[in-house]
């Protein structure tokens, strides 16, 4: 797995970076004198390693789109360039220093060509979380296209192949045990595509967060903007479905329990309005917090491997590797669980809007 490869790679960096190795049986003639400056340099090296690891959770630009100027339309580099195309600024690791936002991109490329710009136009950054979402969406579309074609070809015949059987079992579980179990078969049939998309799209992004795919990769569901966008789709379907089913006025009246005395309304109405906000907020924070917490633990253990000093240098490194692998397996389980929980809660919220009497 890529996670294990990263762990071992960090372990090898320990001796190379000057981290002291564990003791051996060979005699020591004299203790070298280590100055305060050398101690500070070692501490700075460890800090850089931890900082670079935790940037896995931080959105960063991977490309940019520019329209207008001398470029016309196309991709440009997501960092400031000199007239010869080389990076104008480098970070502490010698890599190009990316733009922090699209405003910096437009300020740079909007300049005249002699200053490294494109002489006007408009552009925006593409972040790694965008690329992960596009890749995940493409994978989900491709899988369902292939599975749908095979299902159409098989017709009423028994499914063949482990992959096809796993997909069919998962789809039937989401449809029968989640959607139909909450909303009923008649009302839930039209919502099955929505919740299948929710489940597989979130699952694919969660799994991609565990894989190393270069600068394009990252944990999209550990970004609150992504989880908020997913929760927003649930919020929209809560109200659109309720209005379609009951009409505009009755849909909003359904949030107030029938038979309540009028003098209770000043208390109930604010509570129900707050509930409309809390539902998508709960979906947003639950998915974001669980994926972020798991990755923070994994990355902390990766850093401990580096601080341990090497892959063959005693129990500290081996313990850190063992814990990191165990957490990676747990994260894979969490990837499925969080996709299930987000989808199931969305089904409950939409089902409550369609069937308020339940």
Image: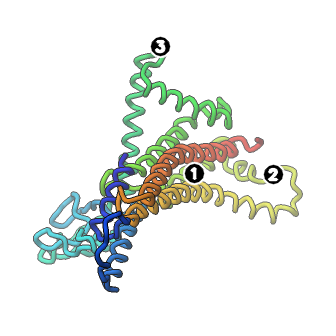
**Crowd band around label 3 with a 10 angstrom C-alpha radius: few (<14), some (14–19), many (20+):** few
Q: Residue 107, position in %: x, y?
A: 27, 75
Q: Can residue 243 be seen in this view?
A: no
Kindly check if marks 1 and 3 are in contact, taking CB atoms under 8 A apart as contact: no
Q: Which label sits on residue 257?
A: 2
Report which residue position mark 3 lands on: 157
Q: What residue appears at the point 32 percent right and 82 percent down from the top-left corner?
A: 34
- Asked whether 40 or 333 is in front, the reply is 40
As measured in the structure, the alpha-carbon distance from the residue carrying label 3 to the one carrying label 2 is: 49 Å
Sequence-wise first label, 1 or 3 = 3
Q: In which quarter of the image is the C terminus?
A: top right
Residue 202 vs 89, above or below: the answer is above
As measured in the structure, the alpha-carbon distance from the residue carrying label 1 to the one carrying label 3 is: 39 Å
Q: Can residue 141 be seen in this view?
A: yes
Q: Residue 95, position in %: x, y?
A: 24, 68
Q: Position of 288 compared to 13: left or right?
A: right
- Asked whether 309 or 223 is in front, the reply is 309
Q: What residue appears at the point 23 percent right and 73 percent down from the top-left corner?
A: 90
**Crowd band around label 1 with a 10 angstrom C-alpha radius: few (<14), some (14–19), many (20+):** few
Report which residue position mark 1 lands on: 236
Q: What residue appears at the point 83 percent right and 49 percent down from the top-left corner?
A: 258
- Asked whether 108 or 240 is in front, the reply is 108
Residue 84 vs 294, above or below: the answer is below
Q: Which of marks 3 and 2 is in front?
A: 3
Q: Position of 48 compared to 358: left or right?
A: left
Q: Residue 183, position in %: x, y?
A: 67, 36
- Examine the image and state in which quarter residue 217 appears: bottom left
């Amino acid at each position: 797995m890529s996670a294990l490869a990263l762990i071992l790679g960090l372990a090898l960096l320990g001796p190379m970076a000057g981290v002291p190795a564990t003791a051996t049986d060979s005699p020591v003639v004299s203790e070298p004198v280590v100055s305060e400056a050398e101690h500070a340099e070692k501490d700075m090296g460890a800090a850089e390693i931890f900082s670079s690891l935790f940037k896995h959770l931080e959105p960063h630009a991977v490309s940019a789109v520019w329209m207008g100027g001398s470029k016309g339309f196309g991709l440009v580099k997501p960092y400031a360039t000199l007239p010869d195309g080389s990076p104008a600024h480098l970070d502490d690791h010698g890599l190009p220093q990316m733009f922090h936002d699209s405003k910096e991109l437009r300020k740079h490329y909007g300049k005249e060509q002699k200053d490294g710009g494109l002489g006007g136009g408009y552009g925006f950054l593409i972040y790694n979380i965008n690329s992960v979402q596009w890749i995940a969406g493409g994978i989900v579309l491709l899988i369902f296209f292939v599975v749908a074609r095979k299902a159409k070809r098989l017709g009423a015949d028994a499914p063949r192949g482990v992959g096809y059987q796993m997909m069919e079992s998962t789809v039937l579980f989401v449809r029968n045990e989640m959607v139909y179990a909450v909303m009923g078969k008649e009302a839930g049939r039209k919502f099955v595509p929505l919740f299948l998309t929710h489940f597989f799209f979130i699952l694919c992004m969660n799994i991609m967060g565990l894989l190393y795919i270069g600068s394009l990769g990252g944990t999209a569901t550990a970004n609150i903007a992504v989880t908020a966008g997913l929760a927003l789709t649930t919020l929209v379907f809560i109200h659109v479905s309720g209005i379609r089913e009951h009409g505009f006025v009755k849909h909003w009246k359904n949030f107030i329990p029938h038979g309540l005395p009028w003098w209770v309304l000043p208390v109930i109405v604010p509570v129900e309005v707050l509930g409309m906000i809390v539902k998508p907020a709960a979906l947003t924070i639950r998915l974001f917090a669980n994926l972020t917490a798991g990755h923070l633990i994994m990355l902390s253990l990766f850093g401990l491997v580096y601080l341990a000093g090497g892959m063959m240098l005693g129990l500290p490194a081996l313990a850190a590797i063992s814990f990191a692998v165990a957490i990676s397996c747990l994260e894979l389980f969490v990837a499925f669980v969080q996709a299930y929980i987000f989808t199931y809660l969305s089904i409950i919220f939409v089902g409550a809007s369609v069937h308020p009497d339940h």
